[in-house]
Image (cartoon, grey):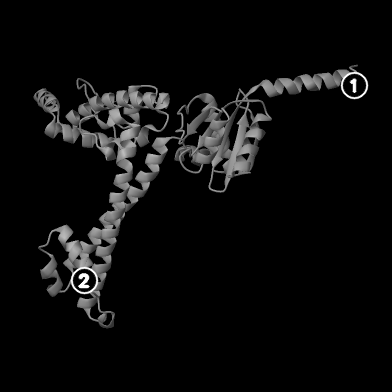
Amino acid sequence: MPTLFECSERDDTFSMAAKKRPVTGGVDTHGHTHHAAVLDRVGRVLGDRQFPATAVGYQALLAWLRSFGRVAKVGVEGTGSYGAGLARHLTAHGIALVEVDRPDRRTRRAKGKSDPIDAIAAARVALSGQACGTPKTRTGPVEAIRALRVARGGAVKARTAALNQLHGLITAAPEVLRAELTALPTATRVATCAAWTVDDARLGNPVEATKAALAATALRVQALTAEITQADKRLRPLVARTAPRLSALTGVGAEVAGQLLTTAGDNPDRLRSEAALAHLCGTAPLPASSGRTNRHRLNRGGDRQANRALYTIALCRMRYHPTTQAYVERRTKQGLSKKETMRCLKRYIIREVHTALLADFTALNTT
């Protein structure tokens, strides 16, 4: 029969072995709380717990994961939204992160939906290798560019809505106003409406009320235009400093370069190859062959804003770049449709973009 000392020695040995075993974590993130789960190397659930989404909560979550063993990696949902703070904390402590998509509807219908279930599912896809994407670090100049572009994009959308509202008001305005404004260019129309003086004592009159509405809308358009202009002044030099080689490519301006940088992130090494970037941007060709027909089709997945940026580059080159014009003419003679030619052209452009991005970030990291 083992003595008390022998039993204690066995417990210590088991505890040391448990601390050395590799474990995989999974986190279901929310606005105020994060739910974590941990699995061993064969997928057995060792535990799950909820933590507050604060700096103290991040520390407690990591300490709890490490209490089960050596953390090999952690699968985190929403590393670009609710999980951004946790992802930065784990990365700063040397934990390998895996970006996890939320379970599809079919899986949720079969297994149900709860925070523990989602956290365990995140850990399982990270452990199996089904999820292998590296999240963006969000700690460098690209994150700064992204934040500025979010504000600019909101202003652009709001200005478009205000201009549409102005057009609708003019279309249905009393004839005395509509006849004066209809033939004017947009900029002149906005300036004219913004300069109007409204008599608040006569707002019961449809003409005066319409003038008040037009003036308010026009002033909003002018304010948003000023906001967009200010955002462009801030973005242009920042983008040029961060990615000079990308900005120098034909057809790439500050807005296009900013979008491509935002898509790649501060750590473009997470894009394992040029093909990975093409897939991320929705320009990787998808096979669409059948029988004697051998062809590829457009990829409608990926980051559609990045795909739009590549489309802008392609349009610019098709109009002003002689080499691209010759390429389009040759592919058209081969029987390719305009969509197929555009797909091929965007795939060629992504090669230049990938090379320029890697060169820019290599230079940025060495300075």
Position above or below: 297 against 193: above
Q: Contact (CB < 8 A) between labels 1 and 2?
A: no
Relative horizontal placement of residue 46, taking residue 104 as reference (left or right): right
Q: Dot 1: what SS? A: helix
Position above or below: 148 against 289: below
Taking depth in this image into account, of 107 and 81 the one nearest to the observer is: 81
Q: Quadrant of residue 57?
A: top right
Residue 136 image position (x, y, % from top left): 44, 33
Taking depth in this image into account, of 69 and 269 the one nearest to the observer is: 269
First in sequence, mark 1 or 2: give its number. Answer: 1
- At 18% from the left and 69% from the top, the residue drawn is 172
Q: Quadrant of residue 274?
A: top left
Q: Which mark is residue 323?
A: none
Q: Dot 2: what SS? A: loop
Question: In what quadrant of the picture does the C terminus appear?
Answer: top left
- At 62% from the left and 34% from the top, the residue drawn is 62
Q: Which mark is residue 4?
A: 1
Q: Could one spot residue 61 in this view of the protein?
A: yes
Relative horizontal placement of residue 284, taking residue 338 as reference (left or right): right
Three-letter code, disc 1: Leu
- At 23% from the left and 68% from the top, the residue drawn is 214
Residue 343 image position (x, y, % from top left): 22, 29
Position above or below: 363 against 107: above
Three-letter code, disc 2: Trp
Relative horizontal placement of residue 77, taking residue 256 as reference (left or right): right
Q: Which residue is mark 2?
A: 196
Residue 310 image position (x, y, % from top left): 25, 34
